[in-house]
Image (cartoon, rainbow, N blue to C red):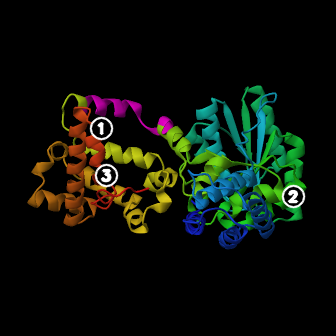
Amino acid sequence: MFENLTDRLNKTLKNLRGQGRLTEENISQALREVRMALLEADVALAVVKAFIARVKERAVGQEVSTSLTPGQALIKIVEAELVALMGEANESLDLRAQPPAVILMAGLQGAGKTTSVGKLSRFLQERQAKKVMVVSADIYRPAAIQQLQLLADEVGASFFPSDASQKPVEIARAALDQAKRQFFDVLLVDTAGRLHVDDEMMGEIRQLHAVLNPVETLFVVDSMTGQDAAIAAKAFDQALPLTGVVLTKADGDARGGAALSVRHVTGKPIKFLGMGEKLDALEPFHPERVASRILGMGDTLTLIEELERKVDKKKADRLAQKVRRGKGFDLADFRDQLQQMQGMGGVASLLDKLPGMANVPDKVKNQVNDREFVRMEAMINSMTPKERRHPDLIKGSRKRRITLGSGTTVQDLNKLLKQFKQMQKMMKKMKGGKMAKMMQGMGGMPGMGGGGMARGKRPF
């Protein structure tokens, strides 16, 4: 997320190394680069001007403490201003209302509204224990209603049936009535999108808003559209009393222009980030955490929350007990570890949240990819249970059978077996509780291209 902006900012701020204090000259030079980085990230010009002015005002002449370099001092200022730009703190949904609390989802076509309804349904049920009903008032897009029904079934939300022959206002009234009678906590309403902002669309959604009187009206927008996202949000806000924004496809946004522009341009908080296609890939938007990611300092709080929520604790406990008892770590256990990492959004999502990853060479980052994990899992699935328990049996004809069954090569399989043996050695060291020795063997982690991090070199 925001890789291009992160790289540019890190290079710019590193140039201040070795200088005794922040001066108007070195600040101006650094901020010219920051300005270019923000414009290349498609941040709105007005936002860039205001941001640079605030950073310069705070930075010029600031004394650098003995524990900080000028670059670090400027990073602290830039980080604080990024947080201020994006809204200081997370603003959660305000569901304090006579049930059902109605959430109206608005946005342009293709922004990901329907998928976001599914994700938000899951979020509200799993993290806030809400009883959720969803309804589609999109009578224009083919299969929009059926798509929402499939998503509702997948996340376990109640679906209110609607039909393309009905009027959106009629659908909304009927859904609200049933949600009241069946004591739902939340009613999520998916609305029709258009390819651009038009009077007909705005008139329809204003009618829906009047009928439903929602506690939250969320504008769903594709973050990859950059500052256009902020412009579209402002147009919607002039027609509707928006309460917040959902930025979708943020995992594929290498620039970050939308995240940095929306709050300043609209005055409305970003409430959620869509971070992938999976229905659990919705994160509450925390400005301070996103600022930390932009500056390459990771996001350990979100990572810890994901670990607590997504790691299968029973499997983890079983593996820990197995290792403690001295029973061998086998390829079936190795596959479980791969699946757990993929369940957390894949290795790219994990790396994005690790501090210092901006300083890791691209060559190392590029070796770590989810396709590697998929290939590894396919090879393990092509083995017999006996082969998973006793990998030393895998030779000659067995290797040919496994690679044919998984669509891989013998070289791929040899690489997997080598990485597995390194992981196995780590697990043996854990038996005696020798954590320091285990950390020395971290070079063989799965997905690290066989060699892992260079021995003796700190990744960050």
Mark 1 Cα-neighbour bin, 10 Å: few <14, some 14–19, many ≥20: few
Looking at the rendering, in which quadrant would you find the N terminus? bottom right
For the residues marked 1 and 2, what is the alpha-carbon distance in whole angstroms?
Answer: 60 Å
Kind of residue at disc 1: Met
Query: Relative to residue 245, is residue 371 depicted above or below?
Result: below
Mark 2 Cα-neighbour bin, 10 Å: few <14, some 14–19, many ≥20: some
- Which contiguous range is marked in magenta? 308-323
For the residues marked 3 and 2, what is the alpha-carbon distance in whole angstroms?
Answer: 52 Å
Q: Work out whether residue 164 can be spotted.
A: no
Query: Relative to residue 61, is residue 287 depicted above or below?
Result: above
Residue 291 in magenta stretch: no
Out of 395 and 191, give the one closest to the viewer. 395
Q: Work out whether residue 48 can be spotted.
A: yes
**Disc 3 on helix, strand or loop?**
loop
Residue identifier under label 3: 445
Residue identifier under label 2: 202
Which of the two discs, 3 and 1, labels the residue nearer the N terminus?
Answer: 1
In which image quadrant can residue 26 be found? bottom right
**Disc 1 on helix, strand or loop?**
helix
Q: Please identify, in this view, whether the residue under mark 1 or under mark 2 is nearer the observer.
A: 1
How far across and down, in percent of the image, does residue 253 sit? 60, 63
